[in-house]
Image (cartoon, rainbow, N blue to C red):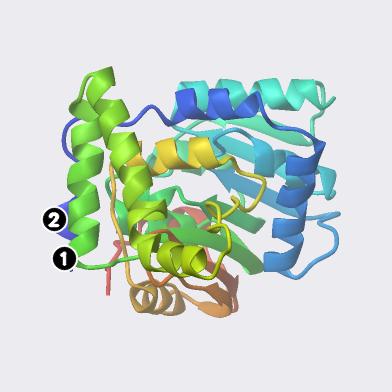
Amino acid sequence: MNNSALRASGPRFGFGQNWQSYAKVIDDCRIQEARASLRDMLAVERLTGKTFLDIGCGSGLFSLAARELGATVHSFDVDADSVQCTKDLRERYGFGEDSGWVVEHGSILDHAYLSTLGTHFDVVYAWGVLHHTGALWDACQNVAGLVASGGLLFLAIYNDQGRPSRGWWWVKYSYNRAPTPMRLVLLAGSYLWMYQIKRLPLLVTSLARGRLPERVPAPERGMSAWHDLVDWVGGYPFEVARPGQVFDFFCARGFALRRLVTRSGHGNNEFVFERVAPAGDFGAALRSPPTAG
């Protein structure tokens, strides 16, 4: 599938508004799940003494989790509502005056902003973010330039399903142009397609055996099923990549794959890379032209 066909045009989804709604249900249990997700994927118990860059911080949940694990955290997001949401969460959990957690407005595509960071980071976290920029490979190039030598890069990028991904592009594009009633129709239809119609054979089999059908899979990483659905259906711009494309891209830039979790259908493939080559000059890395592979 040609990613250029999925480049951004038209409206953008209000990610920050959805995150602000989600923030109302954040509790200690969800924070614990977020911490567990970081420890598991990064294969660490603590992040004490490490610098952690949260790109597209959203609700701020994973910035909070990293800070509670001992990292010095720098969070940024292009969406002003997300920035405020993260600041509110920082305040709510007692880090409002904490110099070890900076929250800013910024874009991973803005070289001028990235240059103000002025350093490489021990852990760079960009979960489900880069494919919403409208310039996935440019964003990947910029991310690569932010990771320190020996540092870890934790990415999640939408899986390329081929034709189904093109169908989801139209759903997302339509959702962001539609009035509220039509958005509700698209949400309901997407829910039925993802969690019910595709599960019909399992549903029939379960009932035939006298068992109740399985429920919608519980969300992971401390997320919320409703907010995940809204994020998925509304999430535009929308780009996708095959795992091999992501692997080739970062390995060509001095990274080695340390962890991989793939999806057979829609959703995010997760990658943890380690920078095994010297990080080099910070500014030069940002200026290097990307190639998608």
Query: Mark 2: which secondary structure?
Result: helix
What kind of residue is marked 2? Answer: Ala
- Whether the residues at callouts 1 and 2 have beta carbons within 8 Å, the answer is yes
**Front-lying residue, 43 or 273:** 43
Return the x and y of residue 263 as percentages of the image width and height: 44, 69
**Left or right placement of residue 279 versus residue 205 in this view:** right
Q: Residues within 10 Å of mark 2 (few under 14, many from 20)?
A: few
Q: Secondary structure at mark 1?
A: loop
Viewer can see residue 108:
yes
Say few, some or many: other residues with alpha carbon within 10 Å of mark 1 (under 14 / 14 to 19 / 20 or more).
few
Give the numbered dot on residue 2: 1
Kindly identify the residue that appears in the image at 70 percent across and 26 percent down: 89
Q: Nearer the viewer, residue 189 or 152?
A: 189
The amino acid type, in three-letter code, at marker 1 is Asn
Instruction: Kindly indicate the quadrant of the structure image that contains residue 284.
Output: bottom left
Residue at coordinates 63% horizontally, 30% vertically from top-left? 103
Residue visible at 56% across and 65% down in the picture: 210
